[in-house]
Amino acid sequence: MNIAEEAFKELYPGKTENREFRISYSSKFKPLNANVKYTQNYIHFFLSRDWQEFSDDLKKGLIQHLLVKVFRDYKYEKTMELDLYEKFVSNLGRYAKIDKTDPELEESFNRVNTEYFDGEMEKPNLVWGSSAFRKLGHYEYATNTVLVSSVFKGENELLDYIMYHELLHKKHGHRNTGKRTIHHTKAFKEEEALYKVKDVEKKLKTFLRKKRFRNLLGF
Ligand SMILES: [Zn+2]
């Protein structure tokens, strides 16, 4: 019995599964990535190579996290391994290695860090994303990276607001209820409301509307 099968039995005791459980490690994945492929005959977990370094308990937690997605069966009692995995993921940002930083984003980070976090926030990786209007920013736990839409280049006031939001994700982590992952927790929202530029949401909406309009006209 491999750890995938063990993970299944611990998560869903009493449930029968005739498919074969398989695990492979791949060097093609980004750090700490994983996915699962399944057919009528097997359930195959693919983990990035760096997962090999971690304990079986943590790997089982990851596999259980994926199993819930495969089966869409939320009637389980949270296992120690799943709990371990969730804590690990939500803390990753604090340990991941820093290696990528854009100077304009770094200035924004420094302003926000001084103003709102007493300069105590550790600098994550800071990178520009594409010029997206929908996804304005993102914090990726696995690589400890804040990504900001390129539409905010040169827009310090709005950039700082996006930066603040993403840094709050780094600070607060996320919470799992079993059914879903909560990224904007109550504590998150309370702290977000402390942002000092009170009409910033309005400014953001106006900016995005104008920018979109300009883009449509091809300026
Ligand atoms: Zn968010």
Image (cartoon, grey):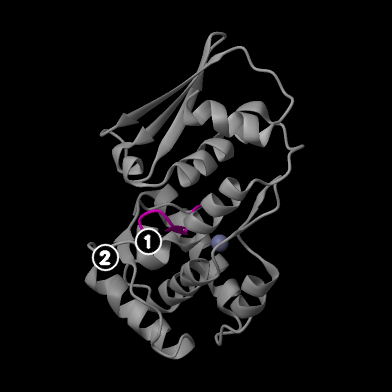
The secondary element bearing badge 2 is classed as: loop
Query: Which residue ends up furthest to the top in the rendered image?
Result: 41
Query: Which residue ends up furthest to the front in the rendered image?
Result: 1
Q: Where's the C terminus, which quadrant? A: bottom left
Q: Is residue 19 above or below residue 163?
A: above
- Residue at 32 percent across and 59 percent down: it is 128
Please state which of residues 7 and 131 is positioned toward the viewer in this rendering: 7
Q: Residues within 10 Å of mark 1 (few under 14, many from 20)?
A: many
- Specify the quarter for ligand 1: bottom right
The secondary element bearing badge 1 is classed as: loop
Ranked by sequence position, the earlier of labels 1 and 2 is: 2
Q: Is residue 126 above or below residue 70?
A: below
- Residue at 54 percent across and 58 percent down: it is 87
Distance in Å between CA atoms under marks 1 and 2: 8 Å
Q: Identify the magenta region.
A: 135-143
Q: Position of residue 76 (x, y in %)?
A: 73, 39
Q: Is residue 140 part of the magenta span, yes or no?
A: yes
Mark carried by residue 98? 2
Where, by quadrant of the figure, is residue 114 drawn? bottom left
- Residue at 25 percent across and 34 percent down: it is 27
Q: Is residue 46 part of the magenta span, yes or no?
A: no
Type of residue at label 2? Ile
Q: Are marks 1 and 2 in contact (CB under 8 Å)?
A: yes
Type of residue at label 1? Asn
Mark carried by residue 144? 1
Q: Residues within 10 Å of mark 2 (few under 14, many from 20)?
A: some
Please state which of residues 154 and 7 is positioned toward the viewer in this rendering: 7
